[in-house]
Amino acid sequence: MKKNWWIYPVVVACAVAVGASVGVIIKRFIVDPEQEIIGFNPNACKPDAEALFKKFSKSSDPKSDLRPYELVLYAQEQYKSAENSTSYCYGIANAVAVGLNVEQYIRSAQVRSGNNYYEEQVSKSSQVACSKRMYINDGSDKTILYKEKEKGKYIQIDDNITTSQYELQKECTPSEYKELYGRELPDMFIYIIHQITVETENLKEVDNGYEIELVLKPAQGGYNYRYQMVAVSDLEGMPSFKSIKLTYLLSKDFVLKELTADEQFVAAKMGFNADTHNVLNYKYFQGKTYKIPKIDEDFDYKTLKEGN
């Protein structure tokens, strides 16, 4: 059968739509078996916020008394407990396939306003466009999912704003959402950080706080993240992680400020593998009030970026 070589850059662009990538290269046109993860229970790695807060409050020198990964978990649990918070992510994906380059622009955002939660994930290149939105409305026990209309023909991305048109995908319970995306929407963070998933850790003091670098065991640290990748990019089975390095910036009082995630994995699409290298840059604003956009309203990245 004649191969349509033009389609491969399109497929690779879909595969990197889960995040900002610095390069995707077709490795081979044979799909490897899914990564085997034996004897690992992700539920046993859920952070104990109460224990973390207690250990932190009793310490006169948290950077010495808590391990670096525990300081990250403490900052994340503080962020999750805030009544209001906002974060965003910028990225560009450069996909290389059969001699052709595809540049993919990536945006994502997350808002908590009391008991209301919002997320969006948007990706666009010359070949493909994807956009997803998720809402939990105050008092509701349902998560509402929306997806792009007409294969993303209305999606636009620039430095200031993302624009798209959406249609209802489905409504689901928190547990149903977790089955799709690897976490419940209020969980906010996708990587599994625990003493058994952290391979190496390092803390250093910087001018405005602390920089903490965590290298995770790829299969375990990315266990839940695989589900999100499949849900966003419609991959053929779970991706196989090869490496995950997370670099956090915490303030001097251990408030979460930034994250740079550097990850490599193999993703399968249309019967072939893509070696993928993602670099994602997040900014976090704990306590910041932000109006959650309605489904026909744009998310204003410019105001957040220029105001902080």
Image (cartoon, rainbow, N blue to C red):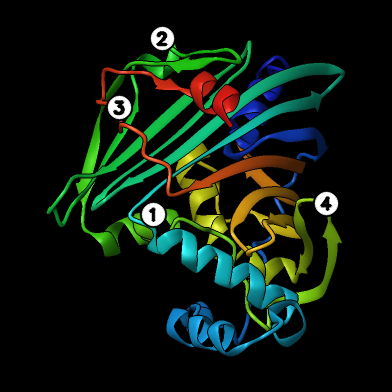
The residue most toward the front is 60
Residue ID at (18%, 52%): 142
Q: Do the residues labelled 4 and 1 touch (CB within 8 Å)?
A: no
Query: What's the residue type where badge 4 is placed?
Result: Asp
Sequence-wise, the earlier of marks 1 and 2 is 2
Residue ID at (66%, 48%): 258
Mark linked to residue 180 = 1
- Position in image of residue 18 (x %, y %): 58, 39
Sequence-wise, the earlier of marks 3 and 2 is 2
Mark 1 surroundings within 10 Å by alpha-carbon count, few (fewer than 14), some (14 through 19), many (20 or more): some
Nearer the observer, 123 or 201: 201
Sequence-wise, the earlier of marks 1 and 3 is 1
Task: Classify residue 111 by image quadrant.
Answer: top left
Q: Distance between the residues labelled 1 and 2?
A: 25 Å
Query: What's the residue type where badge 2 is placed?
Result: Tyr
On-image quarter of the C terminus: top right
- Position in image of residue 66 (x %, y %): 69, 83
Residue ID at (62%, 38%): 19
The residue under label 2 is 154
The residue under label 4 is 207
State left or right for residue 150 relative to residue 286. Answer: left
Residue ID at (67%, 85%): 60
- Position in image of residue 63 (x %, y %): 74, 77
Q: How far apart are marks 3 and 2 (CA)?
A: 17 Å
Q: What element carries label 4?
A: loop
State left or right for residue 267 relative to residue 174. Answer: right
Sequence-wise, the earlier of marks 2 and 4 is 2
Q: Do the residues labelled 3 and 2 touch (CB within 8 Å)?
A: no
The residue under label 3 is 293
Query: What's the residue type where badge 1 is placed?
Result: Leu
Q: Are marks 1 and 2 in contact (CB under 8 Å)?
A: no
